[in-house]
């Protein structure tokens, strides 16, 4: 690490919902910044006016607010390097475009889309570069007067970066080490478009990183091919000495098969790929992790370990522990499979750490939707018996419904297996035992019932199975006497009578 203050940025484009891979990139930036006492910045890269989506920026802000990832500067909170939206910074970029043109490191290109398509059809694997630029309609071919006349006439143009052929460009990457790329594989990238007077990603990215004094650029592996171009741009603008250090993170891979994780994988396998629900302009709604019932801290913990290894067996980390443990050098070079089942496991672990009262608070809205009136104390007691069986709060209803509503039917398979010829007569006797028990605690009732069963020499398992079927309606649930204590003596007797009348 140099003495330069650590300043990192997450720079999404507001072209739709935030992908879970972007969340992980932002998380690693945040952890790195906080580990080194640095700043974490949100910059909105909205120079692609054609793909701008209304509401996408607010969605990004809302997502990080839910996740608990806080920015030190950004489009939503301001800061010393404001503005943080590139569309509001377009007055800044033009002078750097002009500098590159004046320095003969960039040039005007007037090629129409039709001309470019024709050249692609003519030249196999066409690339606008040192070997083809002389065939095209640009200021390297046209006279100065022709260029000036075209611009004066309002002819639309782009400015392309002039990349010399056959130069070895070295990128020093904190994760991948030294990466060497020959400049001949690069095309003369468009840096600026006269049509909207906005720079493209490549120029705006470099200028903003320099002016915002970004010390480290931590981004996805998919951006590695653009790193050599950015090295050349830093050099061309005279900023090579202050160039940030690069770190290209491994891809998040499909849970099955090969390739990068996509929204289609989530649709196919039934898991979210966005932090919050997203509604398309068509009205189609895509689920988010929040709506699926994930705790934000569980999702953070899950994502942190997809591509980073703490070097220990520890799996459960608070955000503070992640900050303390994080090291960019321990990030993997290879992609990480997106094991969504492991994500459920993390949510289960965090759910178990919640107090029964905290879970009850989260579960109360579900009870309210079902028009069930239950006290927080009773609900807490119930959830304490079943919470180990679930991964999500929403799953608690399936595990607890019989505490609140008497069974209206009885599972056929369970009846066939558990309801014996003598079940009705034995349960009728059991009613008398229950009614005589003044202390209806689980412990006292269990002791009285088992003493009675032993004295009658009844089959304990058969009677308990029939008792459970009467109270629950199927063969599930926690300890039967815990159930009996919570629903109470009167309800127990009513349910047993109903089962006897229904099942004979």
Image (spheres, grey):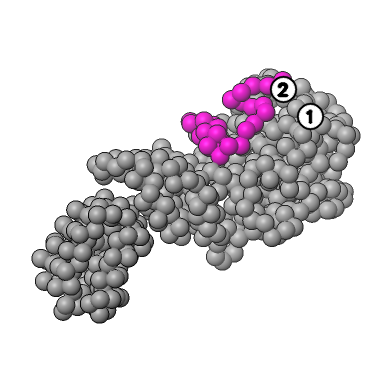
Which class describes the residues within 10 Å of circle 1: few (<14), some (14-19), or many (20+)? Answer: some
| Residue 378 appears in view | yes
On screen, 105 above or below 292? above
Residue 418: in magenta span: no
* Left or right, 62 with reference to 196: left
The answer to which quarter of the image holds residue 280 is: top left
Residue 457's disc is none
| Residue 188 appears in view | no
Contact between marks 1 and 2 (CB within 8 A): the answer is yes
Q: Choose between 471 and 92: the one closer to the eye.
A: 471
Of the 4 image quadrants, the one containing the N terminus is top right
Q: Choose between 253 and 464: the one closer to the eye.
A: 464
Where is residue 137? Give x, y as percent: 71, 37
Report how far apart the C-alphas of labels 1 and 2 lie in the structure. 9 Å
Residue at the image position 15 percent from the left and 68 percent from the top: 428
Where is residue 483? Give x, y as percent: 31, 57
* Left or right, 244 with reference to 431: right
Q: Which residue is mark 1?
A: 213
Residue at the image position 29 percent from the left and 71 percent from the top: 451
Q: Secondary structure at mark 2?
A: loop
Residue at the image position 63 percent from the left and 45 percent from the top: 318
Q: Which residue is mark 2?
A: 81
Which class describes the residues within 10 Å of circle 2: few (<14), some (14-19), or many (20+)? Answer: few
Residue at the image position 64 percent from the left and 27 percent from the top: 74
Q: Which residues are magenta?
A: 54-80
Q: Secondary structure at mark 1?
A: loop
Where is residue 172? Give x, y as percent: 84, 48
Residue 62: in magenta span: yes
On screen, 1 above or below 311? above
Where is residue 99? Give x, y as percent: 81, 25
């Amino acid at each position: 690490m140099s003495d330069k203050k650590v300043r990192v940025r997450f720079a999404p484009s507001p072209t739709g919902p935030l992908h879970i891979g972007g969340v992980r990139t932002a998380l690693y930036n945040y952890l790195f910044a906080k580990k080194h006492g640095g700043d974490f910045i949100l910059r909105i890269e909205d120079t692609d006016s054609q793909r701008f989506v209304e509401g996408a920026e607010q969605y990004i802000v809302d997502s990080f607010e839910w996740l608990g990832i806080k920015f030190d500067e950004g489009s939503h909170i301001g800061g010393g390097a404001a503005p943080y939206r590139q569309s509001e910074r377009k007055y800044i970029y033009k002078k750097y475009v002009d500098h590159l043109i004046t320095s003969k490191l960039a040039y005007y290109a007037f090629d129409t889309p039709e001309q470019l398509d024709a050249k692609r059809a003519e030249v196999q694997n066409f690339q606008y570069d040192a070997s083809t630029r002389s065939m095209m309609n640009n200021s390297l071919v046209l006279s100065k007067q022709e260029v000036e006349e075209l611009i004066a006439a309002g002819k639309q143009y782009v400015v392309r970066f002039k990349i010399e052929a056959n130069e070895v460009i070295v990128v020093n990457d904190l994760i991948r080490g030294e990466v060497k790329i020959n400049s001949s594989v690069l095309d003369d990238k468009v840096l600026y478009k006269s049509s909207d007077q906005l720079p493209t990603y490549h120029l705006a990215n470099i200028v903003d990183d320099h002016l915002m004094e970004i010390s480290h650029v931590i981004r996805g592996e998919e951006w590695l091919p653009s790193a050599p171009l950015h090295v050349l741009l830093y050099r061309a603008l005279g900023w090579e000495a202050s160039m940030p250090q690069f770190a290209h993170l491994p891809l998040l891979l499909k849970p099955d098969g090969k390739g990068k994780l996509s929204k289609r994988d989530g649709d196919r396998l039934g898991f979210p790929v966005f932090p919050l629900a997203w509604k398309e302009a068509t009205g189609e709604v895509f689920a988010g992790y929040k709506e699926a019932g994930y705790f934000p801290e569980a999702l953070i913990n899950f994502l942190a370990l997809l591509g980073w290894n703490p070097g220990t067996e520890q799996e459960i980390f608070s955000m503070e522990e992640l900050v303390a443990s994080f090291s960019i050098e321990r990030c993997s070079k290879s992609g990480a499979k997106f094991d969504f089942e492991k994500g459920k496991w993390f949510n289960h672990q965090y759910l178990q750490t919640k107090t029964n009262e905290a879970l009850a608070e989260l579960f109360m809205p579900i009870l309210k939707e079902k028009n069930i009136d239950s006290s927080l104390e009773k609900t807490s007691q119930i959830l304490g018996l079943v919470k180990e069986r679930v991964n999500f709060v929403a799953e608690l209803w399936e595990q607890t419904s019989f505490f609140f509503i008497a069974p209206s039917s009885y599972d056929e398979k369970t009846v066939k297996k558990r309801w014996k010829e003598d079940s009705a007569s034995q349960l009728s006797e059991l009613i008398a035992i229950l009614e005589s028990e003044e202390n209806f605690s689980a412990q006292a009732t269990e002791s009285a019932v088992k003493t009675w069963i032993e004295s009658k020499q009844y089959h304990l398992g058969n009677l308990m199975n029939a008792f459970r079927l009467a109270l629950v309606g199927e063969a599930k649930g926690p300890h039967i006497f815990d159930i009996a204590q919570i629903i109470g003596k009167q309800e127990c007797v009513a349910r047993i009578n109903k089962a006897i009348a229904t099942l004979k």
